[in-house]
Image (spheres, rainbow, N blue to C red):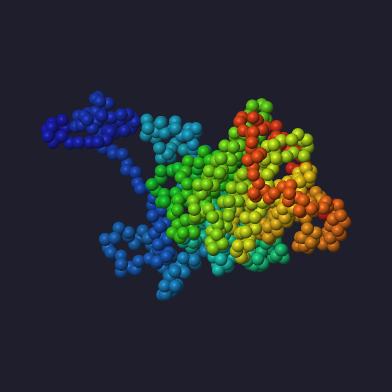
């Protein structure tokens, strides 16, 4: 090494010498050069092998190529005359893309034909997903922190493993090749007629995405030509078609099961079966964002069909896939554009909403808590006003369901009260009620007051928020409703009864307004089971209230009118929602069994509308049972109990408050022997239908 260099011309170096780099040792060559570093005093200190430069990240390159291909698919490639010799984009690097674009635009001369490239893809070969580039997420409690610290010491990367990887432990291809599976790729035939496909896409965005804005309409439609046959995007697209089918005009045979045109709630079942067959293998494959989105949409579809309780299981799978790829964590990834980051946020928050909804409606465990999600709320990146309003609706729903989660954790716990020493007090109930009222009072003006002049979907969004408020309030108090098996009087039970009665009447009235306000030719906007099943629950509470008032000698005709109105609301929804049809059958039988004196002509008309019951037998039974119904003198009853909508609850709140435990008023935790549990299983499973028919 040359040691006779003047100080003024002393060369500079800013890296470790070859020996120190090989030993992974700290090197002071930048300070001692051109002299030897302190570690090489007795050896040669050379700088012949510089560290290899890291190339451009592959993901960044793929993103640029994907963007370029979208532009070329839209506008066509640049003509050869526009390509200069000095262009950094050589002809060879884009030869494959230009050849495909030239095939697509070979015979196109008009602007209309060029724009049709957005919707047509002549090449039937499916594009392979980049499954190897997907990564799993490892949280803080894993070995992630230790490995990171070691790499800082040893400069160890995944590339260093390549020289010491024994194939029998690392080669997964031969294992997956021996696994039998029928995951055939998507074909154009899977999506049916192209015109119908785009009708279904429009129906989905108009009626489903408007209340759960999971997808961006413009970006989704733009991605169809390029990604239609990919497994992940194809699964998402076909579930969009399945949900869109549920919002087509009644009787549209193109989306119904042949020979079963009476099952409108199974519209799109053909798409659903294809999706089940061609979804990714969730065991051996790392999911993508689109796989999670497709699972979310499958949950929405199943909720209205034959297996409504299975929607909770699908939600669990989607939740695990989402956490496996870290959708619940905020990533500072400069390679992701704003659209990708926003899509991740919306997918995770949609799962949060649906998980809380399922937990409340089905009485299940909450799979994820609000505090487990480290993400910003969805942003308004759309250009049209209705889509931006949909995002605001979603954000308000997220805030509400956080309160609902706290209600479930505070009141509907599963562990034994005595062992844990936990108790629910009046103060706890008051605190939850106060938070709920605070949420409603802070609703933005554009989502508060529903007007008849509003757009149909906007009107329904506003109504849904009010329904959600009253449904949430009923969840605070319905555990404390009067217990027929207990003769002990409780003022708080009576308070809870009137509050739940008020909520039930309001829920039924709002749904009735929704059905009367618009044509609803394509059905109502999507509502999760927490909202959609609220009318069913409201009718049951009204029947319970009537039985309690009859027991106490305080009959009120208004209760009967609301029960009838609730049945009518359910009847209008049953064509597109299987559970609503089962609810109608259950409530009609219930009012007869409980001898609730509904109008005889009303019941007769309802039995005529029911397809699975012999009308003649029903009329005969109703006629015989009518004589046992008690007579209700409306003039006398109005003097006893006024309309609960105008009832003064303050008289019941007097003397209540403090930390007194309410545990004794709550139901038993063990429901294995409860008849009502078996009854609900029949409603949600339909498991006893064949048994009853066989016995008959």
Location of residue 71 in the rendering, given as x and y in whole percent from the top left corner: 40, 62
- Name the residue rendered at 85%, 62% in the picture: 616
Compared to 47, does 259 lie above or below?
below
- Name the residue rendered at 60%, 64% in the picture: 518
- Name the residue rendered at 44%, 73% in the picture: 112
Answer with left or right where residue 269 lies relative to residue 224: right
The quarter of the displayed image where residue 115 is located: bottom left
- Name the residue rendered at 52%, 64% in the picture: 124
Say which of 684 and 548 sits in front: 548
Compared to 63, does 316 lie above or below?
above
Q: Quadrant of the N terminus?
A: top left
The quarter of the displayed image where residue 485 is located: top right
Location of residue 668 in the rendering, given as x and y in whole percent from the top left corner: 72, 35
**Residue found at the very far top of the displayed protein:** 42
Report if residue 173 is visible in the image: no
Q: In which quarter of the image is the C terminus?
A: bottom right
Compared to 276, does 650 lie above or below?
above
Location of residue 547 in the rendering, given as x and y in whole percent from the top left corner: 77, 46
Report if residue 104 is visible in the image: yes
Answer with left or right where residue 470 lies relative to residue 560: left
Say which of 122 and 306 sits in front: 306
The quarter of the displayed image where residue 463 is located: bottom right
Say which of 42 and 28 sits in front: 28
Q: Looking at the image, how many numbered discs can be counted on the residues? A: 0
Say which of 355 and 132 sits in front: 355
């Amino acid at each position: 090494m040359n040691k006779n260099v003047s100080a003024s011309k002393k060369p500079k170096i800013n890296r470790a010498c070859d020996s120190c780099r090989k030993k992974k040792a700290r090197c002071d060559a930048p300070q001692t050069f051109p002299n030897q570093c302190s570690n090489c005093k007795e050896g040669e200190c050379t700088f012949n092998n510089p560290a290899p430069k890291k190339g451009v990240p592959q993901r960044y390159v793929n993103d640029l190529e994907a963007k370029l291909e979208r532009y070329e698919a839209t506008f066509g490639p640049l003509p050869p005359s526009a390509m200069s010799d000095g262009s950094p984009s050589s002809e060879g690097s884009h030869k494959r893309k230009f050849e495909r674009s030239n095939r697509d635009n070979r015979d196109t001369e008009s602007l209309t034909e060029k724009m049709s490239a957005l919707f047509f893809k002549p090449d039937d070969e499916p594009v392979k997903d980049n499954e190897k580039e997907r990564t799993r997420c490892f949280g803080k409690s894993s070995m992630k922190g230790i490995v990171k610290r070691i790499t800082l010491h040893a400069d160890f990367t995944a590339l260093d493993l390549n020289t010491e990887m024994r194939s029998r432990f690392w080669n997964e291809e031969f294992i997956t090749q021996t696994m039998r599976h029928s995951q055939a790729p998507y074909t154009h035939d899977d999506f049916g007629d192209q015109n119908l496909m785009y009708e279904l896409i429009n129906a989905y965005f108009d009626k489903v995405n408007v209340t759960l804005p999971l997808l961006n309409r413009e970006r989704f439609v733009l991605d169809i030509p390029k990604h239609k046959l990919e497994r992940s995007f194809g699964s998402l697209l076909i579930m969009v078609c399945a949900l869109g089918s549920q919002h087509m005009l009644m009787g549209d045979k193109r989306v119904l099961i042949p020979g079963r045109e009476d099952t409108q709630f199974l519209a799109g079942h053909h798409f659903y079966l294809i999706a089940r067959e061609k979804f990714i293998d969730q065991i051996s494959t790392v999911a993508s964002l689109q796989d999670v989105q497709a699972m979310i949409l499958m949950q929405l579809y199943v909720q209205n069909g034959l297996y409504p309780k299975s929607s909770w299981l699908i939600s669990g799978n989607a939740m695990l896939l989402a956490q496996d790829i870290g959708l619940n964590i905020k990533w500072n990834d400069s390679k992701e554009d704003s659209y990708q980051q926003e899509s991740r946020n919306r997918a995770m928050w949609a799962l949060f909403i649906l998980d809380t909804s399922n937990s409340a409606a089905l009485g299940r465990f909450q799979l994820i808590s609000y505090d487990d999600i480290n993400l910003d709320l969805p942003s308004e990146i759309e250009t049209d006003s209705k889509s931006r309003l949909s995002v605001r609706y979603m954000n308000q729903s997220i805030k509400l369901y956080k309160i609902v989660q706290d209600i479930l954790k505070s009141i509907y716990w599963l562990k034994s009260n005595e062992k844990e020493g936990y108790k629910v007090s009046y103060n706890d109930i008051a605190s939850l009620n106060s938070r709920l009222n605070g949420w409603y009072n802070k609703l933005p003006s554009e989502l508060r007051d529903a007007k008849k002049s509003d757009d149909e979907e906007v009107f329904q969004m506003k109504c849904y928020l009010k329904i959600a408020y009253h449904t949430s309030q009923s969840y605070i108090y319905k555990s404390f409703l009067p217990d027929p098996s207990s003769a002990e009087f409780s003022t708080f039970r009576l308070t809870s009864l009137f509050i739940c009665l008020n909520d039930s009447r309001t829920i039924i009235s709002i749904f009735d307004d929704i059905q009367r306000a618009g044509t609803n030719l394509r059905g109502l906007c999507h509502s999760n089971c927490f909202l959609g099943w609220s009318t069913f629950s409201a009718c049951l509470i009204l029947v319970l209230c009537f039985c309690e008032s009859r027991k106490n000698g305080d009959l009120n005709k208004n209760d009967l009118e609301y029960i009838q109105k609730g049945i009518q609301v359910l009847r209008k929804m049953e064509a597109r929602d299987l559970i609503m049809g089962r609810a109608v059958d259950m409530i009609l039988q219930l009012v007869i069994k409980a001898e609730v004196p509904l109008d005889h002509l009303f019941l007769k008309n309802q039995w005529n509308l029911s397809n699975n019951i012999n009308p003649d037998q029903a009329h005969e039974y109703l006629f015989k049972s009518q004589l046992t119904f008690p007579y209700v003198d409306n003039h006398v009853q109005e003097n006893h109990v006024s309309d609960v909508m105008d009832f003064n609850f303050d008289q019941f709140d007097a003397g209540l408050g403090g930390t007194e435990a309410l545990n004794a008023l709550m139901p038993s935790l063990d429901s294995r022997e409860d008849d009502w549990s078996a009854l609900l299983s029949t409603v949600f499973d339909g498991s006893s239908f064949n048994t009853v028919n066989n016995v008959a």
